[in-house]
Structure formats: C-alpha cells, structure tokens
Image: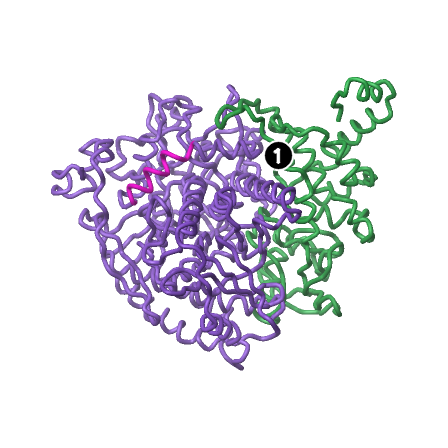
Chain colours: A purple, B green
Amino acid sequence: MTLERHTYDVLVIGAGGAGLRAAVEARESGLRVAIICKSLFGKAHTVMAEGGAAASMGNVNDNDNWMVHFRDTMRGGKFLNHFRMAELHAKEAPDRIWELETWGALFDRTKAGKISQRNFGGHEYPRLAHVGDRTGLELIRTMQQKIVQLQQKDGRETGDMESGIKVFAELTITDILKENGKISGAYGYWRESGAEVLFEAPAVVIATGGVGKTFKITSNSWEGTGDGHALALKAGANLVDMEFLQFHPTGMVWPPSVRGILVTESVRGEGGVLTNNLGERFMFKYIPDVFKDKYADNEAEADRWYEDQDNNRRPPELLPRDEVARAINTEVKAGRGTEHGGVFLDVSKRLSAEIIKKRLPSMWHQFYELAGVDITKEPMEVGPTCHYVMGGVEVEPDTAAAVGVPGLFAAGEVAGGMHGSNRLGGNSLTDLLVFGRRAGIGAVDFVKKNGANPVSQAAITAAAAKIQAPFDREGGENSYSLHAELQEITHNLVGIIRTGAELQDAIAKIAEIRKRSANVSVSGGRKFNPGFHLAFDLDNMLLVAESTAKSAINREESRGGHTRDDFPGMNNKWRQINNISSFDGNQVNIREQVLPTIPKELFDLFDIHELEKYMTPEEIAKGGSN
Amino acid sequence: MTRNIKLRIWRGDSTDGGLKDVVVEANEGEVVLDVIHRVQATQMGDLAVRWNCKAGKCGSCSMEINGKPRLACMTQVASFGEETITVTPLRAFPIIKDLVTDVSFNYKKAMEIPAYEHPENLAPGEARMEQVDVERSQEFRKCIECFLCQDVCHVVRDHEENKKSFAGPRFFIRIAELDMHPLDMLKNRKKTAQEEHGLGMCNITKCCTEVCPEHIKITDNAIIPMKERVADIKYDPVRWLGTKIRKREGL
C-alpha cells in the first residue's frame, strides 16, 4: 500500500483555541496550513472553558489596564511566570478579544453595549469577557467559522475550498520528524482506518492542550493525554516546571460517574459561597499573608463587595485556585466535608432562580441532569479536580518557538512559563489567542527564512514500525489496565499534597509501568480501535507523569500548584529556579535553570513591600535589570 | 449500589454487523457512556465509540439509545429501570464501525453556509450592541454540534437523495443566527436558505427541537420565522413588486 503523503508550509497539531488561532494567522500570511485534530473538528477541550477570557478592556471598571492585569497574573503565579509572557499576554489580550468580535463572536454586553466583563478569582477588576458560562464554545465556534470563511475565500480564488487550509479530523500524530537538526514534518495515523499518514512541513506548531488524563480525577476529556508534551520531549525540546498542576477547587464529587467534571469558577464570581458540614464559611481561615490586604476577613465585608467593589475587599472564595483547592482539601481531611467527600458551594441564597439560570445555564443543566440537584434551590457538592498543567514546552516568549528545536513552536496549555506556578481563571482563553497568534507568526517567519526540509525514508520507516508494533505482539499487557494503574499512582503519590518519599515511590512505579507498556498488545484490527489508540496515548502519559514526578521531587518548597508536605511554605530561593525536563531516549532528566531577571520597568510596577514577600534581599537590591 | 444490567450494542462496520448482548456492571448515578466504557475496558477492547467531555458540552457521544437519538453522556442508566438498553449508531449517517458514524456530511454543509461579514468601517472594539439583540443569535450559538437534529430529521433520515439539497436543522439555526446577528452585513440569507439550502423541504414536525440537548427552539425560533418571512415576501404581490421596482432587499 502506498503511504498517504501531504506537503504543507505549516502543520498545526491540535485544533483547540491556540491551534486554530495559529492556523488563521499562518493562512492569512499566505502560507498553506494543515490542522490536525485528534477528535472531530470543534470538539477540542477549549469548548469546556466556561467562565470567560481575561482581558483588561476596562468596560466594567475603567481603572483596569494591562499593568493591573500583569500584576494579578504574576501574583497568581507566585512570581514564577516568565515575565515577558505575562507582559505580552496582558498587553495583547484586549485586541485578541475585539478581533474575535470582527469574526462574528457575540459576547454578553454591558448596559452601554460594550463587551461585559465578570469577576474571577485573582483578578482585581471585573475582567472576563464571557458568554453565559459557555465562553470556550463561543471561542472555538468563532474560530472554526473563521476558518470556513478563509476556506470559502480560497474556494472563490482557486476552485478548491481546501487548497490553502485543510482540517484533518480524527488523526493522531505519533512522531514529530526532524532532518539535519530541524523540523521536517510529522507522522501519524487516521483513527478511523488506522492507515498511516506523512506530513512534510518545515514548521510544526504544537497546540495539544493538557495532561489531565494522567490523573484519576480530572476535568479533562480523553484527549488530555500530554501528546504534545511528549512529542516535544522526544523531538529534543524541553519542558519547564512540570510539577505545577492546577487542581481546580470545584469539580463535581457525586455521583461517582461525574466525579471531576468542572464546576465553573463563575459560580463563585457570581456570589457562590463555600461552606463545610458545620455550615461554616471556612475560606476566611485560609487567606495567606501575601493576600491579606486584598481579601475580606469577615462575611459582612465580603458580602458588601458584590455591591461595592471600590470600598470593600474581595470575598476569600475568590482567592487564586491553588489556595481554594488546598483549603477544601484540608477541610475534608479534617472531617468537615460532605457525605461524599466534598464541601458545599451554594449560589441559591444570593441569586434568584431566574438569574442563576441565565448566568450559569450550563451549570444548572449539568447538576440537574447528572446529579439530580437543582442549584437554584440547594447547594452543590464540590471538591478539587485535576484541571490544568502550568508546566509545558519551554518557548521563546515573543515567537512561541520551542527552545532547542528549529521549526518547532508551541502555544496554549502545552507551552510553559506564562502562568508560573498557578494560572488565574480566565487567563487560559486569552493565552490561547495571544500565543496562538504569535506561534502562527513565528512559524510563518521561520518558513520564509528556511524553506522546505524533506523527510528521509529512514525517518518514515522508523515511525511506521512503531505504529505496527503493538499489533505484532501477542498476549501482552492491556493498555486500559496500565492506564488505570498509572492514574492510581499519580492520584495517590503525585496529587495535591506531595512528599519526597511518596514521589520517590511514584518515580519507581511509573518506570515499572513504562517497562511493561513496551509490551502492550492490541486486540482487533486497525479500524477505529480505541485499544490501539490508547496504547500511544499511554506512552505519552507515562513520559509526562515521569517528568512531573521528577520535577516535583526536585522542588523542595510549596508554591502554587505544587505542595510539599515535607517542605511547606514558599522559599524565595526557589522562585529563581525553573526545573527543566529533557529526554535522553531512555528517561527524563531534570536540571535547574535560573529564571530571567525581571526588567526594571516591570519591577517598578509593584510595591516593593509586596516583592519582598517573594524575592530575596539581593534581588530586591538589584531592582530589576536595565 | 452496583448491579448488573443488560446492554445490547450494535457491532460491525459498513459491510456487516448486528446487535451483541452483554451483561455489565452499573453503579449508582452512571450514564450510558459509563457502562459502554466499562464494556470497552473489560470485554470489548476494540469497541468504537466517540466521546470527549462527558459533560454534555462537546456533542461527541451522539448515538441512538432504545431508538432515540441522544447523548450517551447525558442519559442515566437508571432511567431505563430493568429494561435492556440498546445502543445503535446514528441512522442518518454511514457507519464506520460499531457506534461511530461518518458525520462528514455536516462539515460539508457547514462549508456551504456563507460566512459572517463584518461591517467594513467598524474597527475592533467599536461594536456596541444591546444584550437583548445579541441574545436572539446567542440561543443558536449554544449549539454543540451533536448532529442529533440532523439525525432525527425525516427529510434525510431515510432519504439519502435529499442530502444534496438539504442543509438540515443545525444549519438552519446557523443561517438564522447570522440573519439575526446585529452586525452581519451579508444580504439575502433567508432567500438563500429557501433556494439553496432546502428550508422549504422542512415540514415543521419539530423532531429536531425535541432531541436538542441544549433545548434550542430550532423550529419555533429559527425555522418558522425564516419560513414566514420568505412566504410574506414571495406571495405578497405588493412587496414582490417592491423588490423588483426599488431593488429593496427584502429577505
């Protein structure tokens, strides 16, 4: 059988927000673009984003601007963010939102007819552009339809709508290919037929999203298997700070089949209150020192804030996600949880049924249909769920180019650095847009400078052999059971609260599963065979889990989405360190790398006393670089 | 509470296939997709099924459950009591394997609907719209593209020959959404819905509205208003004359 081959200028792996935005940019620059999606077009995990997209447009509170947004983002990430990414994101987010409107997006409006903005954890002002609680769907659909618009334009000019940009749906990439040290393309298979496909392209943008499926309780769909993280590692790129995972504080906990499904932070943004089984509004006990001056320490003030935000401090339910997740975890462990191991989240006391159904329609729907709970009348039961990975591919902030691999780019959740140790809600959707676009530009510039880089036969042969291997083995391991074992290990040993001894145990156990996974065999044929698909996803998840566990054992402090029971508290020395993962063909290795120094003009945006909480006296004395 | 339930799953491909009986464990609160996954992990490793979010937000796990088009992730096992649950692939689309069908018809139709046209002189950030005006289109933008409405619609469900000239309910709401969009500049959307996308073939049985998991009022809020406007102008002689004489854009 002859191999199916395609040649493009830019190959985008992943059809969520970042991938589609990169593809639009590359096509609008005149290049030919292929978009690969692992599922059907328009189903990517971006549709799950509920709350909104953070951009300091200042439509609701005109005190807002990019500098306030930048400060909030750095605080949320506990100053481990790459300052340049946080800066670019804060500066460009409003333009990216307004641009969507010119493509047909319909955001909710303010009374003055502008894009409405809502409050969210860690954001000083109402900042999230939104469409009810289905903002991610609006983003995906708008860009999906923008791509159709570009295809219709190409159709009018060439007679073939798919001549300039084509979507390859239900296709999995198993290898990123290089020749002469530079990207040459990618290899994979159609999920439907199992047939193999070669893409030749001198630039590849990875936009594959997250890694949630390495964990047992997660808000992520089956697609979140860390494919891009693993592909990048194997191609010679680095991952930065993979220990930082965001456990979203509010996932559903009951019934068991929905455990982990996300309950949007908007519920708290709109006035939802967290209580334990004693009826106590416990978040007041968990306000860390670094946030004491920004959050109300009593119920009266917290309640007043919903009406008057200029003269009151914010309710502690709106602390950054890592703080709220840890607080819930502590309450449940202390025996103050609900019957099913969560806490209560109640919005019914503050808002009328009509307003709840209007502002949180999909939450109402989700609880009513899946849990038999009417959230306009009774509280929800919620608990932490693995939601987002802050760590990811190490990139150049301005171009989204992967460090060390010419021609490789990464944007969105798969890229690291932007969110530091903890991401603020709402910053993900604008991250996708800002860095998706930048990755598109980066790829275009690269292709224009470098031109084509053909794939060798040797690379094709090696990639093809890998895909066939599980079919040729008989009586080997079952990929479903190995996946379940991995999820148990990560859940128990690499979860919200970690210790050195448990991480050591996890590293050994993950290595053991990895050894066994080399012997996975597949029953049935190549045609739409989920067991076969999982064999490849599993390989990616194992590599990601190894990187996370090894980074986690190296970081001897607690910060953001990484909590060490044996090293509680932040250590300002660790604020200057990124853990860099690389892959030597056998295992993941970690080295420490010093963060770039924040430039003076950004340093000066902060009150020096705030910086003292995060930085060493030597860093403060230096006052940023010039 | 765990119990064993009876499940009949259609297995096969475009050449051949049939229903297979299995007994599988079901726990309290589980949905049909959960038990299908359990069958996949323990009894049929190569059972093909599409799914993504498992929360009713992505519209991937569309199938027919006891003959009715539904999302498997939003259908409670308990709702069937002791009854055997029969799961089959969407009938209106060609079978690929087991519960997975070829839905590319829908993506082709999506490419035929003329895209949104932004006003040329309206710069980014300058748009001002009232909430009430955006809400009409927002109802249709809730669509998760599960294609259950396309599957249930009689115009194509048993009439392959109609597919060429009929876009289907999902794309009638797409046209309605653009038609009601406060900023869209493209004219004649209703007219092309009638003349090029087969709006006239719909005989308003409302089956699409009934199966919509997002509860979009497809028939009442999109199809009927467009049909009425088309009929008004087409059959009202004065308005018909008006469109001819003054070149007024009526549709």
Q: Quadrant for residue A123, please give it.
A: top left
Quarter of the figure with the N terminus of chain A: bottom right
Q: Quadrant for residue A608, please give it.
A: top left
Q: Dot 1: few (<14), some (14–19), or many (≥20) neighbours within 10 Å?
A: many
What secondary structure is the stretch in magenta mostly built from?
helix
Q: Is residue A89 magenta?
A: yes
The residue at which mark 1 appears reads as B116
Residue B88 located left or right of residue A299: right
Q: Residue most toward the bottom? A: A474
Q: Secondary structure at mark 1?
A: loop
Asked whether residue B204 appears in the rendered view, the answer is: yes
Tell me: residue B152, above or below residue B82.
Answer: above
Residue B6 located left or right of residue A53: right
Nearest to the observer: residue A404 or residue A524: A404
Quarter of the figure with the C terminus of chain A: top left
Tell me: residue A156, above or below residue A231.
Answer: above
Q: Is residue B166 magenta?
A: no
Percent across and percent down for residue A40 are 59, 53
Tell me: residue A175, above or below residue B62.
Answer: below
Asked whether residue A381 appears in the rendered view, the answer is: no
In the image, what residue occupies the spot 45% across and 39% down? A265
Mark 1 falls within which chain? B
Percent across and percent down for residue A345 are 46, 40
Dot 1 amino acid type? Tyr
Nearest to the observer: residue A306 or residue B166: B166
Circle count: 1
Q: Which residues are magenta?
A: A82-94
In the image, what residue occupies the spot 54% across and 66% down? A533
Nearest to the observer: residue B154 or residue A345: B154
Percent across and percent down for residue A425 are 41, 40
Percent across and percent down for residue A48 are 52, 46
Tell me: residue A214, above or below residue A302.
Answer: below
